[in-house]
């Protein structure tokens, strides 16, 4: 049950289901919008960030992200670099979120 002008969100794992959902919604709903959601896993490692080759063969070095960690001996702080990058095996699974609003009866 939705109140008048309420918002509905639907998740569909494939585009064919999105098409059927949108077809069914168009008679009583408005502002139908669909967004693709792609799950991609990232690896997070502490350590130095590697340099890589730029587009023109120049060596490019990304600035490190610094995190401050409290040492166990007291209140002294030390910096460590955090490296974040997508997983090497880029297997992703996509899905679709469809949002719509129930039309007000006038």
Image (cartoon, helix red, strand yellow):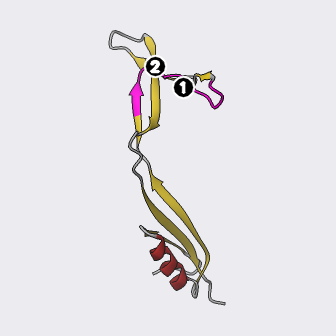
The residue indicated by pointer 2 is 48
- x, y percent for residue 17: 45, 76
Q: Which residue is at the front of the view, 27 or 75?
A: 27
Q: Secondary structure at mark 1?
A: strand
Residue located 50% across and 66% down the image:
97
The label on residue 52 is 1
From this viewpoint, which residue is outermost toward the left?
72
- x, y percent for residue 95: 45, 63
Residue 24 magenta: no
Q: Quadrant of the C terminus?
A: bottom right
Residue located 44% across and 13% down the image:
78
- x, y percent for residue 43: 40, 36
Tell me whether circle 2 and circle 1 mark residues in contact (CB < 8 Å).
no
Residue located 55% across and 75% down the image:
6
Residue 56 magenta: yes
Label count reads: 2
Q: Secondary structure at mark 2?
A: loop
Q: Real-space Cα distance between discs 2 and 1? A: 13 Å
Q: Which residue is at the front of the view, 8 or 11?
A: 11
**Dominant secondary structure of the magenta stretch?**
loop
How would you rate the neighbour count of disc 1 (Cα within 10 Å): few for under 14, some for 14-19, many for 20 or more?
A: few
Tell me which segment is drawn in magenta.
44-57
How would you rate the neighbour count of disc 2 (Cα within 10 Å): few for under 14, some for 14-19, many for 20 or more?
A: few
Q: Is residue 85 above or below residue 12?
A: above
From this viewpoint, which residue is outermost toward the bottom?
106
Where residue 28 sits, quadrant-wise, is bottom right
Q: Is residue 100 above or below residue 65?
A: below
Residue located 62% across and 25% down the image:
57
């Amino acid at each position: 049950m939705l109140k008048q002008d309420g918002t509905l969100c639907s998740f569909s794992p494939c585009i064919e289901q999105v098409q059927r959902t949108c077809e069914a919604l168009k008679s009583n709903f408005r502002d139908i919008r669909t967004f693709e959601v792609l799950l991609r896993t990232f690896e997070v490692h502490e350590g130095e960030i590697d340099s890589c080759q730029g587009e023109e063969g120049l060596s490019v070095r990304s600035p490190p992200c610094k995190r401050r960690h409290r040492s166990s001996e007291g209140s002294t702080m030390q910096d460590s670099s955090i490296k974040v990058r997508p997983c090497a095996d880029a297997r992703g699974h996509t899905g679709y979120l469809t949002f719509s609003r129930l039309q007000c009866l006038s």
